Image (cartoon, rainbow, N blue to C red):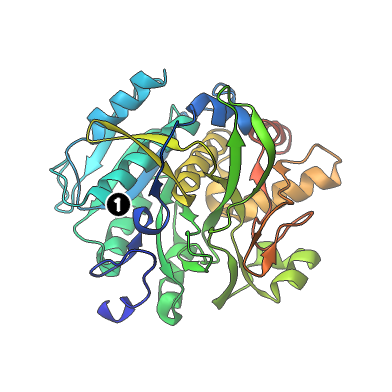
C-alpha cells in the first residue's frame, strides 16, 4: 500500500499509518490529572457498569516488553483493580518483546491504561502489527475484529480517495471500532469511516482537587470537518439539523472527550511516568464506555455509532436528561462550537451517569 504514504502530520514517519503518538500526543510539563478526577468529570462511578464479560482490543505495532509491568504500575499508583493483558505478536505468538519505537510504546501503554480506567472489568487484548504500514495494520485489525467486542484505534491518516476500499471491512465488522479523530484540524481515516465511532477532543482546566475551572471547550487542534470521500451515514442523515450542517457529507467527530488542558493524563511507559495529552486519550476511554454499555446492551456492537445518536434522540423525545454535555465554546478553523450538534464537537462529551440510566431504561 505504498501509494498511500504521502499524507503525514506534525512528525514524519518513514512509511505507513500516522500513529496517534505522532499527531495526538505531546509531553507536558507540570502535574497530571488523577484518573478518579476525570471519571468524576464525566460522571463515571466505576460501579454501575464496568465492562464485565466484554473484550477490548488495542491495535498497535512493533511491540515492547513492558506492557504488563506498566499497567501494573498504573493500577498500583491510582488504586485501580489489577488486570491481565493478553498480548499478541505479529507471528501469532503471545507475549511481548523489546521496544522498537518509543512513540508506539507510549501509545500502546496509553490506550491500555485509559481503557482500563473506564472499563476496569473488561478483558484487554493488545495486538501488535509487524510495522505501521497500512496493509499490515489492517491485517491485525481483522484478527482483533474476530476476537474482540470493542476495538480502540488511536491512529489515522489524512483522508484519501482509496480509503473507500476499506469501508466493507468496517461495515461488516463484528466489533465496534472507536477511532481518535486526529490532532491536525483535518479529517482523518479511519475516523471518517461511516462505520466507526469517531472521538474528537476538548480542552478542560482543573484545580488540583479535580474541580473544573470554567467551561469545557473544543480542543483547537482536534481533527474535525466534513469528509471528502465519505457520504453522510444514516445515523447523521436522519437528523435534519445534521444534514444541513454537514451538506450530506460524513461529519467528524461523533463525540468528544478530554484531550488537553493545564493537567495531562498520566501514563506509565517502560516503568516511567509520562504525561500526555491529545485525542488519543478519547479513543480508549470511549472504548471503555462502549464496553460498559455492551455489558448491559449488546446492540451497541451492531449499531456502532448510530447507537449514541438514537440514545440521544430517545432521551430528547422522552424528556429525559441529556446523555451528552453540550460543548458550546471554542472553534477549530472554520468550525465553531454551538448549541446542539456541531461539526467540531459532534454530540458533545458523554455523561456516563445519564447514559447508563438511559441504557437501563430503554435497552
Q: Residue 142: which quarter of the image?
A: bottom left
Disc 1 residue crowd, few under 14, some 14–19, many 20+, Cα 10 Å: many
Q: Residue 168: which quarter of the image?
A: bottom left
Q: Is residue 347 visible?
A: yes
Q: Where does the image place residue 69, in percent across and percent down from the top left?
A: 23, 28
In this view of the protein, which residue sits in the foreground, 177 or 215? 215
Q: Of all residues shown, which one is farthest toward the front?
A: 29
Q: Is residue 345 left or right of residue 291?
A: right
On screen, residue 133 above or below 23: below
Q: Where does the image place residue 55, in percent across and percent down from the top left?
A: 40, 38
On screen, residue 35 above or below 275: above
Q: Where does the image place residue 229, in percent across and percent down from the top left?
A: 53, 79
Q: Where does the image place residue 265, in percent across and percent down from the top left?
A: 45, 36
Q: Secondary structure at mark 1?
A: strand
Residue drawn 32% across and 65% down? Answer: 17
Q: How many marks?
A: 1
Amino acid at each position: 500500500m505504498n501509494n498511500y504514504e504521502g499524507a503525514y502530520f506534525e512528525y514524519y514517519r518513514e512509511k505507513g499509518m500516522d500513529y496517534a503518538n505522532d499527531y495526538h500526543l505531546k509531553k507536558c510539563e507540570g502535574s497530571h490529572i488523577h484518573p478518579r478526577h476525570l471519571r468524576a468529570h464525566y460522571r463515571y462511578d466505576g460501579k454501575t457498569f464496568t465492562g464485565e464479560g466484554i473484550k477490548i482490543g488495542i491495535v498497535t505495532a512493533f511491540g515492547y516488553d513492558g506492557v504488563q509491568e506498566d499497567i501494573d504500575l498504573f493500577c498500583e499508583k491510582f488504586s485501580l483493580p489489577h488486570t491481565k493483558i493478553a498480548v499478541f505478536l505479529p507471528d501469532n505468538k503471545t507475549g511481548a518483546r523489546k521496544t522498537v519505537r518509543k512513540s508506539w510504546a507510549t501509545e500502546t501503554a496509553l490506550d491500555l491504561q485509559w481503557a482500563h480506567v473506564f472499563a476496569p472489568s473488561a478483558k484487554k487484548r493488545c495486538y501488535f502489527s509487524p510495522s505501521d504500514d497500512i496493509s499490515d495494520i489492517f491485517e491485525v485489525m481483522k484478527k482483533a475484529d474476530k476476537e474482540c467486542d470493542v476495538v480502540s484505534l488511536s491512529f489515522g491518516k489524512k483522508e484519501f480517495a482509496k480509503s473507500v476500499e476499506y469501508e466493507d471491512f468496517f461495515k461488516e465488522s463484528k466489533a465496534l471500532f472507536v477511532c481518535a479523530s486526529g490532532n491536525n484540524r483535518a479529517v482523518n481515516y479511519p475516523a471518517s469511516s461511516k462505520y466507526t465511532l469517531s472521538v474528537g477532543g476538548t480542552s478542560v482546566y482543573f484545580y488540583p482537587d479535580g474541580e473544573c475551572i470554567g467551561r469545557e471547550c473544543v480542543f483547537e487542534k482536534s481533527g474535525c470537518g466534513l469528509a471528502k470521500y465519505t457520504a453522510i451515514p444514516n445515523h447523521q442523515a436522519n437528523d435534519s439539523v445534521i444534514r444541513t450542517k454537514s451538506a450530506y457529507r460524513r461529519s467528524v467527530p461523533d463525540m468528544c472527550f478530554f484531550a488537553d488542558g493545564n493537567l495531562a493524563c498520566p501514563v506509565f511507559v517502560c516503568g516511567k511516568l509520562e504525561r500526555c495529552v491529545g485525542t488519543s486519550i478519547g479513543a480508549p476511554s470511549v472504548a471503555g464506555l462502549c464496553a460498559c454499555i455492551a455489558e448491559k446492551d449488546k446492540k451497541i456492537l451492531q449499531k456502532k455509532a448510530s447507537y449514541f445518536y438514537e440514545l440521544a434522540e430517545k432521551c430528547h423525545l422522552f424528556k429525559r436528561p441529556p446523555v451528552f454535555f453540550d460543548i458550546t465554546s471554542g472553534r477549530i478553523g472554520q468550525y465553531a462550537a454551538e448549541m446542539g450538534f456541531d461539526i467540531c464537537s459532534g454530540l458533545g462529551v458523554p455523561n456516563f451517569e445519564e447514559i447508563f440510566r438511559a441504557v437501563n431504561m430503554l435497552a
